[in-house]
Image: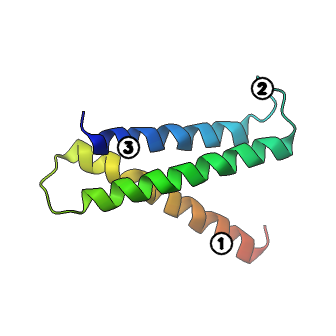
Amino acid sequence: MNHLQKLGLTSFLFLGLGFLTRVFPGTGAKWNPSTAVTVSIICYCIVLVLALIAFMQSRRGQSLDGTTKFLARAPLALVTIGVLIVFLRAMIGV
């Protein structure tokens, strides 16, 4: 497993962790909702940094297999789609 795959898997892990802390805020640690939102935003920021690093390193011109390309580029796409959805919801007032 090379470094791009590790970065991609780590960013997927933090993306899932941020999603789970947002969906299930009261389980386990008995956080209040504001703490759950704070933890999920921190996880999403970590995802964004890791996804940008993996994406930029995957664009260097070396030939990569399909799995490595997917793991290096998919987290940034998912973060971009999520930001677009949040922005559109904010614009229409939902």
Give the secondary structure at mark 2: loop
As rendered, which of 33 and 89 lies closer to the eye? Answer: 33
Going by the picture, which residue comes out furthest to the bottom?
Answer: 91
Residue type, mark 2 in image: Thr
Going by the picture, which residue comes out furthest to the top?
Answer: 28
User: Which residue shows up at 38% across the image and 44% down it?
Assistant: 8
Quadrant that contains the N terminus: top left
Give the secondary structure at mark 3: helix
For marks 1 and 3, give the one nearer the viewer: 3
Residue 60 is drawn in which quadrant?
bottom left
Quadrant that contains the C terminus: bottom right
Q: Residues within 10 Å of mark 2 (few under 14, many from 20)?
A: few
Residue 27 marker: 2
> For the residues marked 1 and 2, what is the alpha-carbon distance in whole angstroms?
30 Å
User: Which residue shows up at 20% across the image and 47% down it?
Assistant: 66
Q: Earlier in the sequence, mark 3 or mark 2?
A: 3
Could you say where residue 7 lies in the image, as x and y percent from the top left? 38, 43
For marks 1 and 2, give the one nearer the viewer: 2
Residue type, mark 3 in image: Leu
> For the residues marked 1 and 3, what is the alpha-carbon distance in whole angstroms?
29 Å
Identify the residue position indicated by label 3 in the image.
7
Q: Are marks 1 and 3 in contact (CB under 8 Å)?
A: no
User: Which residue shows up at 82% across the image and 31% down it?
Assistant: 26
Q: Are marks 3 and 2 in contact (CB under 8 Å)?
A: no
Residue 88 marker: 1
27 above or below 17?
A: above
Q: Residues within 10 Å of mark 3 (few under 14, many from 20)?
A: many
Residue type, mark 1 in image: Leu
Residue 12 marker: none
Q: Earlier in the sequence, mark 1 or mark 2?
A: 2
Could you say where residue 6 lies in the image, as x and y percent from the top left? 35, 38
